Amino acid sequence: MGSISPANEPAVPARTDEAAENNSCRMSDVLAEFLKPLDRKRKHTAKGRGEAAPVVQFAVDFLGDPRMDELTEAKWKLLDEALPDIPNRDNIPRKFSETLFRRYKYAEATKWSKLERVTTTTIKSRYWAGLYKYVDFAIAEKHYRGPRPKFVCIDPENLAPLPRDAFDDDELLTLLNLPLFTGCKNRVHVWQPGGYFVQSHIYWGFLICILTGMRPGEVGQLKCADIRTDGEFYYFDLRPFDARNGRVAVKDLRNLKTNAAGRVIPIHPLLIELGRLDRMQDLMDKEEERLFPEWDAYTRKDGTIRWSQPLSKAWQYVKTKLKLDRADLTLYSTRHLMADWLDNEAIAQRTRDRILGHASDVRGRYGRKGILDPQIAAKIEALEPPVIKQIREILLAAKNRADGGELTVLKTY
């Protein structure tokens, strides 16, 4: 195979007087409008547009940035047939993977040497969904007057999605034996061993995900006031708002992934032993609302916020550092780990769904105050599979060394 230079982006046809008279926008013009940040009263209508941008840009590049009135059924069909031929990033040099179109052209030029296609989930959930969102916008804004296309093409070579699996005990113990949890170099170099104890947002993020099954993005949004107690047990209260306090402004609602994500979750005693409540009180004394003020959210181009970014980046680093190459192991594996523990303790399915924030057609066992049945809460707080005993020893050993002055405590807020 000869040398490959980065694929040239398709030339944008020169605008003609006829096109100007036609007054039909080009796909790229509509994309720019689609991604334009909206004012605060319309911002809620733009959710997901930033995630749609890459595949819409692929359509612009692949079709040569046609005018919207040039988008015929035949062109939509060509695009539909091309989507399954976009490879994933593996084994593609960075300069050829900057856009989906360049990845597509690289696969074409190399005849798919050492490349794989994306999963069917990526095609359906990202590509098709993103294009539909764009087309619906174009129709609503009267930029496109043709019929809404229907995407159906899947290549037999497209990969089937892997089920996300739980951590096994050895993987979990390997993770929690890293310097972040046992003694690190400083606030920045938390993955290098040293004499400092840094309970950062990453430290707590991993532990809360492991010991509660919460989503990474949910952890980043926690406020000090979200830690509640019924006098016996402590909970993270993830409901959108407390109805007992009256109505709240839309801007103050929690950013939930699904309607079922609003719930209360028992806080595992180990988190309290490690100083979770002490941190909360310290922050409240400083009049800080957020439980992790150092946790920076990522703002997408469309103005929507992705809270999971810091923990996701840390996980990618850790996965590489520990050479955890099991394909079905993801950051979300912490949720499946908690699900396994709940299953092993024979916790009722409806309660399991409530704890993990899964939709259920069975009314959950919450009382008028939104708190779990005390007997069920006790069972969940007592979850202590053998690996938790080992985790407790690792984490409390470092905490005790810090309390005893062997490790120097560094705060991150």
Image (cartoon, rainbow, N blue to C red):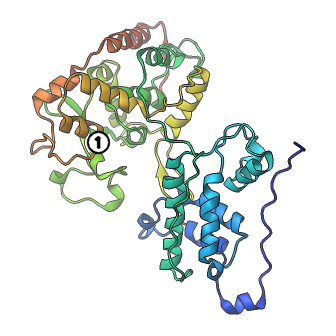
> Seen from this angle, which residue lies furthest right?
2
Q: Residues within 10 Å of mark 1 (few under 14, many from 20)?
A: many
Q: In the current view of this chain or complex, which residue is farthest to the front?
A: 156
Q: Is residue 254 above or below residue 351?
A: below
Residue at image location 66% in from the left, 71% down from the top: 28
Badge 1 is on which residue? 357
- Reply above or below: 336 against 168: below
Can I make out residue 182 in this image?
Answer: yes
Q: Name the residue nearer the viewer: 3 or 331.
A: 3
Q: Is residue 265 left or right of residue 35?
A: left
Q: Nearer the viewer, residue 90 or 25?
A: 90
- Rendering quarter of residue 69: bottom right
Looking at the rendering, in which quadrant would you find the N terminus?
Answer: top right
Q: Is residue 208 visible?
A: no
Is 215 displayed left or right of 374 in the figure? right
Residue positioned 12% across, 43% down in the render: 369
Q: Secondary structure at mark 1?
A: loop
Q: Find residue 355 and report its horizontal and vertical position in percent.
A: 25, 36
Q: Residue at x 30, y 18 (%)?
A: 273
Kind of residue sitting beneath label 1 = Gly
| Picture layout, residue 336 above or below residue 106 | above
Q: Is residue 314 left or right of residue 238?
A: right
- x, y percentage for residue 231? 13, 29
Q: Position of residue 378 (x, y in %)?
A: 16, 24
